[in-house]
Amino acid sequence: MPDLEAHFERTIERDQRVEPRDWVPEGYRKTMIRQIAQHAHSEIIGMQPEGNWITRAPSLRRKAILLAKVQDEAGHGLYLYSAAETLGTDRAELTEKLITGGQKYSSIFNYPTLTFADVGVIGWLVDGAAICNQVPLCRSSYGPYARAMIRICKEESFHQRQGYELLMTMMKGTRQQREMVQDAVNRWWWPSLMMFGPPDADSPNTAQSMAWKVKRHTNDELRQRFVDMSVPQADALGVRLPDPELSWNASREHYDFGALDWDEFKNVLKGNGPCNAQRIAHRRRAHEEGAWVREAAVAHAAKKEVSA
Ligand code: 3HC
């Protein structure tokens, strides 16, 4: 085993990619399955908040854009389940864990989308936060995950841009439309900061994930990067971010910002967010109603095998 372990360590040290055929420590396999599966679950559950507005989009153009985006998220989920399966797990098992609460998905998707401005703010802030988090993951040490991120990040850029453009349009609209945007920003700003995970001091996985180059930056580093990126964008949009402590710190060359409500974060992770039960019930129903499709595909594949 020492040679295999030495080979793994050298691969990480040299910033090379670990591939499915390589030996890896059990802890590495476990944390990669954990992170990739929860990332995939987030993409799939993330379809619900925005999918809620597809039938009520204000124009054909907005409906087409939203349809494309939600479809992209489904593809990201399938991509990531495929990456997780290279580690010896199975998407049926992972879906079961999601539905029974055995695995997590991003806290952000447990908040309701109350107006169409939420679709724009999700694109701008939630997909913007995802880009901040996912671009470094293109250099994650596990090959299939890093490669999936490259394709996903390209599509996330479209997601972020369409959201920001929608908000720019609304901010040039009526007073009511501008108020809708500000209301959505007020509701989504702090939950978007929570997407980056708990403070580094309370993150049980970060140290090891950084050592194995699964993660390339810590939660707090990426959160800070996102705040620094978002403040000028909010100024250009003409909206106020709901944080009275937000201010440029010239000595740090970063924006200082207020304290997050970590009790709210923990509560949402415990399943007590505004939409947790609804999101899981919807996912469970879709899984159950889709069982016949999976059974038909398996039967068809078996028939093909017999006739081959
Ligand atoms: N929501 C739910 N759970 C969260 C969370 C969040 N926002 N942040 C952290 N957690 C969980 C972690 O999963 C971990 O629990 P676990 O050990 O049971 O998995 C626990 O809280 C402690 O957090 P850590 O910081 O120790 O965990 P990680 O090192 O895994 O860091 C992470 C958390 C930053 C989310 C990291 O897993 C990561 O970068 N994941 C990949 C990116 C991702 O999953 N993004 C989710 C959003 S996907 C998306 O936005 C789609 C886009 O199209 C909009």
Image (cartoon, rainbow, N blue to C red):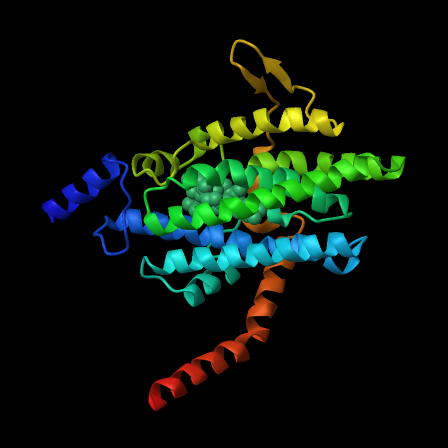
Asked whether 212 or 80 is in front, the reply is 80
Q: Determine which quarter of the picture holds residue 8.
A: top left
Q: Is residue 256 above or below residue 112?
A: above
Extreme residue toward the bottom, this view: 307
Q: In this view, does 236 lie above or below 24?
A: above
Asked whether 83 or 72 is in front, the reply is 72
Tell me if 32 is positioned left or right of 227 in this view.
left
Asked whether 128 or 266 is in front, the reply is 128
Q: Position of residue 236 (x, y in %)?
A: 71, 26
Residue at the spot x=85%, y=37% of the render?
173
Is residue 53 visible to the viewer in this orientation of the structure? no
Q: Is residue 72 above or below residue 291?
A: above
Tell me if 291 is positioned left or right of 138 in this view.
right
Is residue 104 visible to the viewer in this orientation of the structure? yes
Tell me if 122 is positioned left or right of 1 in this view.
right
Residue at the spot x=26%, y=51% of the render?
26
Q: Where is residue 179 in the image (x, y as percent from the top left)?
A: 83, 35
Q: Is residue 109 above or below residue 291?
A: above
Residue at the spot x=33%, y=87% of the render?
308
Q: Position of residue 216 (x, y in %)?
A: 38, 34
